[in-house]
Image (tube, helix red, strand yellow):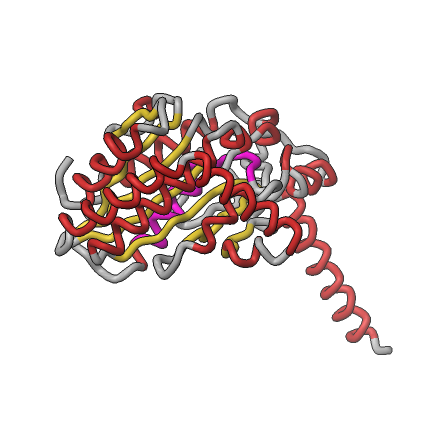
Amino acid sequence: MTLAGVLAGLAVVFLLLRSAWDWRGRNTTRQPAQLSERYKIWSTTHDEVVSAASLMTDGQKAAVARGKREDAVRKNQPAVEEEQDLAQSLGRSIRGADARACLLIDLSGSMERGGIGVAYRLAVAFANMCRAGGLAHEVLGFTTVNWKGAPLRDDWIRAGQPADPGRLCALRHVILSDGQGDNGLDALFLPDLLRENIDGEALLWARERLLALPPARHGQIFVLSDGAPVDDATLDANSATCLQDHLQEVLADIEGDRRLRIAGIGLGYDVARYYRDSLRVDDARTLASDVLPFMARRLSGGG
């Protein structure tokens, strides 16, 4: 091999090594909508956007999820029927509203304590109301790929655990319903779905998807949550308020966007600390009396 060939080979090796080192050491990867340098992400390598159907391919897990859904509905059958009847009626009352809508559901582990059954009932009613009103809509969810940052935190450890790494968990964003049907909502009951919650980035994703729906005068985002954003791996290695700070920053940006409106619905939790427009739900029996009318008023352009 000629000297020129050797030098060319060494140059390629050098570039590959530098690229690998850059990937290992990069802790400030920013997406266009992150808004500021204060919020960091170690890497988006392991992040996922998945359909509910893709999560239901394991027959045994899917059967467990459907069984849990059937049990949740059966135990609350009279209330569920009332909610769905009201959703249809409210939907007809807002027909012609120039709006598009998204329901974004917090899929954190704490939702296992009864919250996910309420989330399912509300998601079905929301979708029925939007269909009856002729509104383009989606139901989305957000969680993480695993607990305690795996596998992203492992990458950070292998890189020597640099200080202030930013978000250290892999996101899993789930398209539960694209507005065409509700079968994907069964995935809410999957035994290994509920983990940790990064609210700020989930809202950025929901906004992006909402604005991609057929045009309307305004877009409405509803966020159903039972607590503050939490990821142990991220909070252990960064400021204790980094996730809450980012959520508040994203909310300020959305609230300043004339195309959009956003409202928080807290399950046994006061989300007014984050959302200017909010409602607290302490009893699932108020879905029909309080929550669905709250949603309908905002979809019709009121408040």
In the image: residue 258, left or right of residue 118: left
Image x and y of residue 109, in percent: 55, 32
Decide if residue 37 is in sight here: no
103 up-or-down from 279: above or below? below
122 up-or-down from 228: above or below? below
Which residue sits at x=65%, y=55%? 58
In the image: residue 130, left or right of residue 190: left
Q: Is residue 196 magenta?
A: yes
**Picture quarter with the N terminus:** bottom right
- Report the residue that reaches farthest toward the bottom: 1
Task: Write down the quadrant of residue 254 in the picture.
Answer: top left
Image x and y of residue 5, in percent: 79, 75
Which residue sits at x=55%, y=38%? 194
Task: Write down the quadrant of residue 145 in the picture.
Answer: top right
Looking at the rendering, the stretch of residues picked out in magenta corresponds to 194-210
Q: Nearer the viewer, residue 13 or 192?
A: 192
Which residue sits at x=61%, y=41%? 191
Image x and y of residue 141, in percent: 45, 44
Decide if residue 124 is in sight here: yes
Q: Nearer the viewer, residue 161 or 226?
A: 226
